[in-house]
Image (spheres, rainbow, N blue to C red):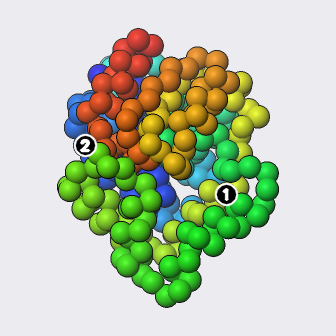
């Protein structure tokens, strides 16, 4: 059990329910799964990382104030658990506000989007938005979105939930978050990460390849790297295994 609030940030094609199974496996009362702006009736849109960091700062203030004053916490700081773009946001926030972060858990994420070639970003957006641009609804696009990140370890319940989450995303939110994603780059700042960091990769993840995450781990000062036989949907594919790795990390760093 963590002494600090554990605040979870989901990926592009889902919402806070991504972590339902993980939160049960961790069994900590201080686990809080957020919905990013524009998702699941959360106000606003994910239009920039600067805006998302300001929003996250407000959310963390709420998590800190909800903590029992008599509880032995680590100065009111939070453990940020970020998955995919949520991991990018967690990393970005921790670099700018290390005094507010007790630890990072980065799952299936990278320190930057793609490479310096702008044509890659343009091709990525064109491919991801092709269905919507052709007139599909988010409900019609949902199966393709899910197939693009859930690996073969996902059971029927996980696939059903993932499809439901993807279908519920407003189109304006989905378009905004993709355009925000391609702007991210903190690759050159990894050596400045202050809190301890657990980096978790899926060996079959094509979106955040394990080899890329190993390189990220090598550049962050206090890091533990764990790899599972899973795809990009690791929190939904193997939540129990992930919970064990997270709990061991929190225990070892006395968090």
Residue 57 occupies which quadrant of the picture?
A: top right
Residue 3: x %, y % from top left: 36, 21
Say left or right for 158 vs 46. Answer: left
Residue 232: x %, y % from top left: 44, 47
Residue 46: x %, y % from top left: 57, 61
Which residue appears at 68% of the width and 67% of the height? 123
Residue 50: x %, y % from top left: 67, 52
Q: Dot 2 corresponds to which residue?
A: 21
Which residue appears at 64% of the width and 22% of the height? 218
Query: Can residue 202 be seen from the camera position used here?
Result: yes
Which residue appears at 64% of the width and 18% of the height? 221
The C terminus: image quadrant: top left
Say left or right for 13 vs 167. Answer: right
Q: Dot 1 corresponds to which residue?
A: 182
Query: Can residue 66 be seen from the camera position used here?
Result: no
Q: Is residue 219 above or below residue 56?
A: above
Q: Residue furthest bottom?
A: 135
- Secondary structure of the residue carrying numbered label 1: loop
Q: Is residue 171 above or below residue 83?
A: below
User: Mark 2, residues whose alpha carbon is within 10 Å: few (<14), some, or many (≥20)?
Assistant: some
Q: Which mark is residue 126?
A: none
């Amino acid at each position: 059990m963590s002494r600090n609030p554990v605040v979870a940030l989901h990926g592009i094609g889902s919402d806070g329910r991504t972590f339902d199974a993980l939160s049960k496996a961790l069994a900590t009362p201080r686990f809080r799964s957020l919905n990013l702006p524009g998702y699941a009736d959360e106000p606003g849109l994910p239009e920039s990382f600067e805006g998302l960091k300001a929003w996250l700062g407000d959310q963390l203030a709420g998590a800190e104030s909800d903590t029992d004053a008599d509880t032995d916490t680590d100065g009111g700081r939070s453990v940020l658990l970020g998955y995919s773009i949520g991991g990018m946001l967690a990393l970005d926030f921790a670099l700018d506000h290390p005094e507010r972060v007790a630890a990072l858990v980065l799952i299936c994420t990278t320190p930057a989007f793609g490479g310096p070639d702008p044509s890659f970003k343009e091709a990525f957006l064109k491919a991801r938005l092709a269905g919507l641009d052709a007139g599909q609804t988010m409900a019609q696009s949902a199966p393709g979105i899910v197939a693009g990140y859930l690996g073969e370890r996902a059971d029927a319940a996980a696939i059903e939930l993932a499809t439901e989450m993807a279908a519920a995303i407003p189109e304006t939110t989905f378009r905004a978050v993709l355009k925000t994603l391609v702007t991210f780059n903190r690759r050159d700042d990894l050596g400045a990460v202050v809190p301890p960091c657990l980096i978790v990769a899926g060996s079959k993840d094509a979106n955040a390849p394990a080899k890329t995450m190993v390189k990220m781990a090598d550049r962050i000062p206090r890091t533990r790297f764990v790899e599972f036989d899973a795809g990009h949907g690791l929190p939904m594919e193997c939540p129990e295994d992930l919970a064990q790795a997270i709990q061991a990390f929190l225990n070892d760093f006395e968090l």
